[in-house]
């Protein structure tokens, strides 16, 4: 009787450990870059990810360099720090990545307002060129 009681506890623990290993989860990380107006070419860390709104998965947290290009708008290069959530801090990340039953989603959205390019009228540029030329000749 004593022996079978321990054996049943052992089986229960083995089944629980097996279920834990089978149902182990993971953390899915996704970053979406949206621009106003949409349609800008988006690169993250010098990797083209598409046209905004564009999304990509990522593995590591840290500072990301985001480059946005669109005709008629100023090219933007933004450095954005992506901080880990509390469940991705050291020690806790082992639980969330390995032992947690199910999937955890970490979705990050980065919104950027595009700035129109300022095209200076040709007359202004030519006027400044003439002024500089006359200053250079006068010296």
Image (cartoon, helix red, strand yellow):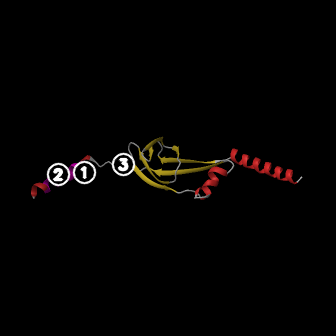
Which portion, as a residue range, is magenta?
A: 123-135
At label 1, counting other C-alpha atoms closer than 10 Å, the crowd grade (few under 14, some 14-19, many 20 or more) is few
Height in image: 1 above or below 72?
Answer: below
Which of 131 and 92 lies nearest the eye of the viewer? Answer: 92
Q: In this figure, which residue is indicated by the disc labeled 2?
A: 130
- For residue 58, the mark is none
Earlier along the polypeptide chain: callout 2 or callout 1? 1
| Contact, mark 3 vs mark 1 (Cβ under 8 Å) | no
- Magenta segment, prevailing SS (helix, strand or loop): helix
In x, y percent, where is residue 133?
Answer: 15, 52
> Which mark is nearer the camera, 3 or 2?
3
Picture disc at residue 117: 3
**Helix or strand or loop: what does disc 3 sit on?**
loop
Crowding around mark 2 (Cα neighbors within 10 Å: few <14, some 14 to 19, many 20+) is few
Q: Residue furthest right?
A: 1
Q: Residue at x 21, y 48 (%)?
A: 126
Q: Comparing marks 3 and 1, which lies closer to the viewer?
A: 3
Name the foreground residue: 126 vs 81.
Answer: 81
Q: Which residue is mark 1?
A: 124
Residue at the spot 10% in from the left edge and 57% down from the top edge: 138
């Amino acid at each position: 009787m004593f022996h079978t009681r321990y054996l049943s506890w052992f089986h229960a623990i083995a089944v629980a450990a097996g279920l834990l290993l089978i149902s182990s989860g993971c953390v899915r990380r996704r970053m979406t870059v949206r621009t106003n107006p949409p349609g800008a070419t988006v690169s993250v860390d010098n990797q083209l990810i598409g046209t905004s709104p564009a999304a990509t998965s990522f593995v590591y947290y840290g500072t990301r360099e985001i480059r946005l290009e669109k005709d008629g708008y100023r090219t933007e290069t933004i450095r954005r720090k992506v901080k880990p959530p509390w469940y991705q801090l050291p020690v806790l990340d082992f639980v969330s990545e390995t032992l947690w039953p199910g999937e955890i989603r970490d979705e990050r959205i980065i919104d950027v307002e595009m700035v129109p390019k300022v095209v200076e009228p040709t007359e202004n540029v030519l006027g400044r060129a003439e002024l500089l030329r006359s200053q250079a000749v006068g010296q």
